[in-house]
Image (spheres, helix red, strand yellow):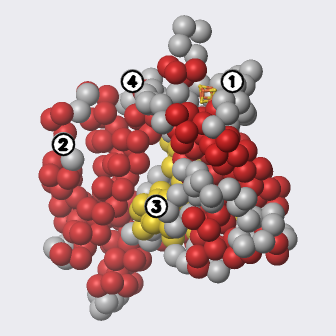
Amino acid sequence: MPFYSYDDVLRVFQVIQDMPCEVSEELRGWRWAEPPLLSPYSVKINASDLSFGCKTGRLAFLRHYVRAGERAGESLRLGSFVHRVIATATAEAKAILYCRKPASGVDFFDMMMQGMLYATEVNSLPREYVRVLNMLWRRAALTYSSAYDKVLELSRYLSLDGLVSRVVPWICEFPIDGRLLGLNRAIRIDALVPPALIIEFKTRKPCRDFEITLAGYALCFESQYKIPVNHAVILYLVFDDDMSSFRVYENILRIDDGVRMEFVEKRDLFAQVASSGVDPGLPEVCDPYCPYLGVCRDGD
Ligand code: SF4
């Protein structure tokens, strides 16, 4: 990990099978047109707004009403870079399999490692980011080269499309429309394993707000595809201080009634604040990663 092989997918589905999750029918995304899922406001909240812990909803006021400038701190910048590397490495792996048809896993690995130089702007990156890029890219090359060998052993006569989906089982930055649930039109799920396993990558410390946001994604997915999403995954990537190694923690979650209702409450608070134009004030404690700390807490 963090790159899932087909075996990882089977392992996760096994865990999920042993984690039953009851969901009330009125809290399924396809019931978006009725309370409690019906969004009472016309303003659309960014799904990413919900991943920050802002108890008064001031974040929505600043972003959607004041349109204040935000500044991402180092943690958010690293997170965004990690997402980009994972998505680019995934796309590069698929491109190699589709277009260059490597003869073996070793052949694939070599092509993948050469591809890193072309796929990203290495020269313009800070040294620590180059280390992160190298680690993640190499991990993708190793995971998928081994998976490729396994698939070749299985059969040399698989269709190309089938082979690629078996080696690289997820789709990165899968787009969904959040408008039926009061969110923005262009939500991008970090990774989707068909038919309905949603995976998010996080480099910040675990918090309930991530799970609430994930419930929002699951509801939006259900509203579009009418497929129940009872579980989802957050992969936490933790880098050491000098970015020379990292660990991955896999959190498989139930998307149950409780977290769905927390999503509804937070969405409605943010939408109400964004619509009213009234500053709700600061909460006692701010999210240490919030991009508006410079606006709200300057001088603290
Ligand atoms: S800095 Fe605090 S009050 Fe301002 S948006 Fe962020 S969490 Fe909310």
Q: Return the mark for residue 121.
A: 2
Residue 265: tell me if it is visible: yes
Asked if residue 49 is positioned above or below residue 9 in the image, the reply reads above
Mark 4 to mark 3 CA distance (whole Å):
34 Å
Label located before the other in sequence (2 or 1): 2
Q: Is residue 170 left or right of residue 234?
A: left
Mark 3 to mark 1 CA distance (whole Å):
29 Å
Mark 2 to mark 1 CA distance (whole Å):
39 Å
Mark 2 to mark 3 CA distance (whole Å):
26 Å
Query: In what quadrant of the picture does the C terminus appear?
Result: top right
Query: Residue 177 in the image: x percent, y percent?
Result: 52, 67
Query: Residue 210 in the image: x percent, y percent?
Result: 63, 46
Q: Return the mark for residue 282.
A: 1
Q: Is residue 183 left or right of residue 176?
A: right
- The residue nearer to you, when weighing 286 against 157, is 286
Q: Are the residues flagged by discs 3 and 1 in contact, CB closer than 8 Å? A: no
Report whether the residue tagged 1 is closer than 8 Å to ligand 1.
Answer: yes
Q: Kindly identify the amino acid type of the residue bearing the numbered disc 2.
A: Glu
Query: Residue 48 in the image: x percent, y percent?
Result: 54, 47
Mark 2 to mark 4 CA distance (whole Å):
21 Å
Q: Nearer the viewer, mark 2 or mark 1?
A: 1
- The residue nearer to you, when weighing 273 against 183, is 273
Q: Return the mark for residue 186.
A: 3
Splitting the image into 4 quarters, where does residue 296 fall? Answer: top right
Q: Kindly identify the amino acid type of the residue bearing the numbered disc 4.
A: Asp
Q: Which residue is the extreme one toward the top?
A: 299
